[in-house]
Image (tube, grey):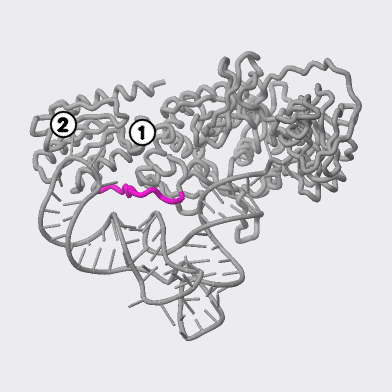
Amino acid sequence: MRYSEYYVPTLKEIPADAEIVSHKLMLRAGMIRKLSAGIYSYLPLGLKVIRKVENIVREEMNRTGALEVLLPTVQPAELWEESGRWSFYGKELLRFKDRHGRDFCMGPTHEEVITDLIRRDIRSYRDMPLNLYQIQTKFRDEIRPRFGLMRGREFSMKDAYSFDIDQAGVDAVYEKMYEAYTRIFKRCGLKFCAVEADSGAIGGSSSHEFMVLASSGEDLVASCVECSYGANTEKAVSYREEAVQNSDKLERTEISTPNVSSVEDVVAFLKNDHPETTELNLVKTLIIKAENRLVAILLRGDDDLNEVKLANYLEANEEMEAVEIEMASEEEIIEATGGAQGFSGPVGLSIDVIADKSVKSMINFVTGANKKDTHYLNVNLDDFTVKAFADLRTVKAGETCPECKSGTLEVTRGIEVGHVFKLGQKYSKALNATFLDNNGRAQVINMGCYGIGIGRTAAAAIEQNHDDGGIIFPLPLAPFEVHIIAVNTNKEDVVQTAEKVYAELKELGCDVLIDDRKERPGIKFKDADLIGVPVRVTVGKKKLDEGMVEVSLRNGSVKEDVPPEQVVQKVQELLKKLADECEV
RNA sequence: CGGGGAGUAGCGCAGUCUGGCAGCGCACCUGCCUUGGGAGCAGGGGGUCGGAGGUUCAAAUCCUCUCUCCCCGACCA
């Protein structure tokens, strides 16, 4: 490809609304342009990268025996009503009506459509296992789209759905997908890890996320420094020894704590008269509003509520659906506790009290007294009723690993690029997708689903591979393999040499970009650095007069002068070296 | 959804408080010059000042409404 004939509108200045590196660089390198919040156009260079990711995904999916399909982006409401998600999914689902007034939505995911498809065709246990996938545009009306392709509203995703006769079948595909994902992300040149995850709105039991570690990540991952345990903090647990109850229960007493309500302040306030009070024997009481119902949550003073765990608990045990958790308002707190905001406690409450497991072993602790400027000392579990104990806290860095019980957990930021779920029968049951087993009895199909964010993977690769000058593409995702710079377009021999190398490399099937523009050298070098093509051939007057051409790698590891006739061979050598590094 | 900020040339911004010729840098076009790290000189083109309404002799500037975009938050207990 000739640069002079290509469409790569690079930007010298940093676009004002880009926050993270990948977003800035994709805009600056002329890969993408924003059309509307969270909605982007792909320019030739960006599209080439996207296609590279897609093809790696496609190859690895095909290798597992999965079959490619293409499902509609526009989906009828009836299907979503049948699965129960029309009301469940909330505002992220973009809904609209057709000319007849019928309800439709832009597909944010395709469980309903695929299940509807196969329920018509799968009759017998002989028709399975089956694993279908597609690479399709999704639309999710995110609350806050941001970071370019990282969290867009319209985005490309590979989603696969597997169908099996039993749990063992699901487990086998799950394993296969897990391996395929590992190969895919390795081939994309990414440093990543797979961690246990919450299954969120998709539902299902077992679930793993593939996380690319990057400071710009929106997820937090807890991982053990010693063993292989890793989990999203929405899900992560830690090992905590039960406190030893070596003291007798004391009598509860009221104490005046004027204007002292936060955990920190209470501990500081009591420091002199009651030095035994620390965050560890203080119980904080959160009044939570979950779908118009008020609940009191008890946590140890140093713990933080994990809203995902709470929502999951309520959905599982209180027959609530799609629980949205919010903090109760001041009025609601007064209504629920009869006391002031900031002084809530479990004693005497009429609403349900749900406590974190850590509270179970606590003794003689401090709580609010549901009365302005007042706390209780020496509260014990028999002073109030706890409806249930559950894991509701968020793990923190430095805590003990729940698996090996010896390593500590560290918490790092990650970008979720892939997610695998065991769905079980959630959708097949709702949509009545059944088959006849070898006894002729009707059984519900078992499902799994497996997603990869295509654009997000490309963006994550840039987050991990760049420098001040621009992108440093790993070879498998690079828009071109070789970038030839003809430094002095006014020198006949420079142009001829560059053109000769270009023609020869093209002849060999190499994807090569030649910068043949009549621009000053600085502009060409800056653009080349920005675009980040892995191998560069620089043909300039100065070195050509000495009979040399410069061959280098964008990652800075190689920079050599070779005679013109050896350039092609040298380039091939470097390409092979780069390819080997990404081999799995 | 709540809070904050911003919409002025393709991009980045000033001008708004205190109403009075719509500006700067980069980019773009022409010419000269220049070719190993986003040069230089000279000339030039380009803006319904997000939109609607209002106040005024006069509005980018003041008032009202509206649209869009960005950031922060959704653990006070």
Q: What kind of element bears circle 1?
A: loop
Residue A147: image location, x then y, percent: 49, 43
**Closer to the camera, A277 or A488?**
A277
Q: Chain of mark 2?
A: A
| Quarter where residue A326 is shown | top right
Q: Compute the Cα span from label 2 to label 1.
A: 23 Å
The residue depicted at 64 percent of the width and 16 percent of the height is A403
Task: Answer above or below: position of B38 versus B61.
Answer: above
**Closer to the camera, A520 or A345?**
A345
Residue A119: image location, x then y, percent: 65, 36
Decide if residue A16 is in sight here: yes
Q: Quadrant of the C terminus of chain A?
A: top left
Q: What residue is disc 2 on?
A: A549
Type of amino acid under label 1: Phe
Task: Answer above or below: position of A480 versus A390.
Answer: below
Q: Chain of mark 1?
A: A
Q: Do residues under tags 2 and 1 come within 8 Å of each other at their CB atoms?
A: no
Q: What residue is disc 1 on?
A: A473
Decide if residue A445 is in sight here: no
Q: What kind of element bears circle 2?
A: strand
The boundaries of the magenta stretch are A5-17
Q: Quadrant of the N terminus of chain A?
A: top left
Q: Is residue A6 magenta?
A: yes
Residue A103: image location, x then y, percent: 65, 54
